[in-house]
Image: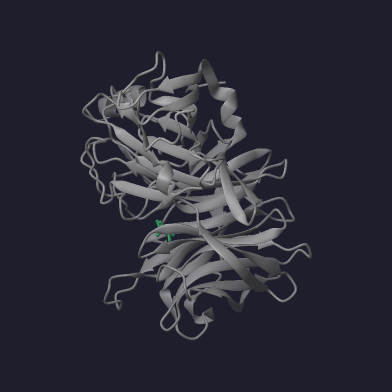
Amino acid sequence: MKNQKLSQFNKNERPVFHLTPEKGWLNDPNGFSRYGGKYHLFYQYYPDATCWGPTRWGHAVSGDLIRWERLPDAIMPDRDYDIGGCFSGTAVTCEDGRHMLMYTGCRPDPDDRQGRGLQTQCIAFGNGTSYEKYHGNPVITGDKLPAGGDPHEFRDPKIWQETDGTYRAVIANHNETHGAQILLFRSGDGLQWEFEKVLADGEGKPGWMWECPDFFPLDGRDILMAGTMGEVHTICRIGDYDHETGTFLETAWQSMEQGFDFYAGQTVQAADGRRILIGWMQNPQTAERRGIDLPINGQMSIPRELTLRGGRILQKPVRELEAYRTDEIIYRDAKLRSEEEIRLNGIRGRTIDLELSVRADEAGPYELFRMRFASDGQQYTELRYEPAVSAVALDRSHAGPGAANRTEAKTDVRGRGGRLDVRILLDKLSAEIFINDGEQVMSAVIYTDRHAEDITFYVKGTAIMDIAKYRIKENK
Ligand code: FRU
């Protein structure tokens, strides 16, 4: 019975170009890296149920960030120091060629009144297919924390190597007086670690704890990214890091997601230098709420290329996706008449890549543009744009079962005289919307019935629209 459900799911519902677990639960991306000529992506994985349980690291490899091959699970929660879960972490290549994983081991703490585990940092070495835990684990324990640091909220190391061969790691921690803090540790060999300093604290920022930090250079600046707990967000702090003194000076910050479902992001640098971000297309507040019984719960976002322009980070789907486009359908200068809901021949589907540009015509500004997709008339997800207030809304209140705690997300966009450009990726259980060249991104998991494939357009006033739509195929 169970297998039948899985094979039905594989045939009909399983996302085609997003990484999903074979079965059960997936959360954060881990160890996103290039090793042995391939991209490696590990992930928080619990195959025995579709809810969170003590996580292991699942493992997948890809040549192009779109088509993933699952490999045997890399590390299991099977030691006293990680029996509560092999939590999130990252990967580097060591001087001797080994792939080194740094992760958080969580073990139960009978003395903690909130039932939280004790979190320590651990190491595993591997060759790209199999991994072994370091015999000296854990390598960083709570006694290395600065005063006030909570050892139950101490996780998700991001490790990197400096040009002199020494290692650094930034690790998330909660401080009893300052709240969220990101700690910088240093090591000569990756195994003996010393606390260096608080790289950044939470003052003036949302979230009582910042999980899953990443720290990376982008177009001449340095970016500290993290998932904020409390009100869930992925935020990036844009600044400059002094490698000598280990000081990070922040000049601006921004939220990386204006929709619902993107969290715990990690980046990798592609061979051609691009900085690529992937996230868990879910978030801790919505992940366990759904009114539908599927054999999996969790998927990764489309990898996003990052660039910095005018002090803002822009995000676009990785260009590798374009090799999977087929069945192109183009409309130029399609006229939208007031309050008439229209469909366009061939513009439909649930595994598609769609580029749309809408603008005012000679009659002047329009009041509202609305698009419904994954629609059968009853179920649909709605994107609305109101040029007068430069606001975009994504509404999944009619998207079918699995009522999430938030059904509407809104974002301000740059006013461009009534012009809006969006790129929409639909892949069975999700929609990802890249607005105005990636200035904003809105992601939503939707459990809409898979037969709901229609797309409709509606305007108050009149407008003109260009569309290019592609089906995404399974293989190049
Ligand atoms: C974020 C997170 C991480 C932790 C992992 C456990 O979603 O809570 O901080 O390492 O999930 O699965």
Residue positioned 28% across, 70% down in the render: 115
Please determine whether, in this image, residue 208 is positioned above or below residue 79. Answer: below
Please determine whether, in this image, residue 384 is positioned above or below residue 99. Answer: above
Left or right for 69, reference 218: left
Left or right for 89, reference 290: right
Image quarter where the N terminus lies is top left
> Visible in this render: residue 22?
no
Residue positioned 65% across, 44% down in the render: 34
Where does residue 69 sit, x and y in percent of width and height? 52, 33
Where does residue 54 sit, x and y in percent of width and height? 35, 55
Residue in front for this viewpoint, 152 or 339? 339
Q: How has the structure been colored for display?
A: one colour
Q: Where is ligand 1, by quadrant?
A: bottom left
Where does residue 333 sit, x and y in percent of width and height? 50, 20
Residue positioned 38% across, 61% down in the render: 83
Please determine whether, in this image, residue 70 is positioned above or below residue 184. Answer: above
Q: Quadrant of residue 85?
A: bottom left
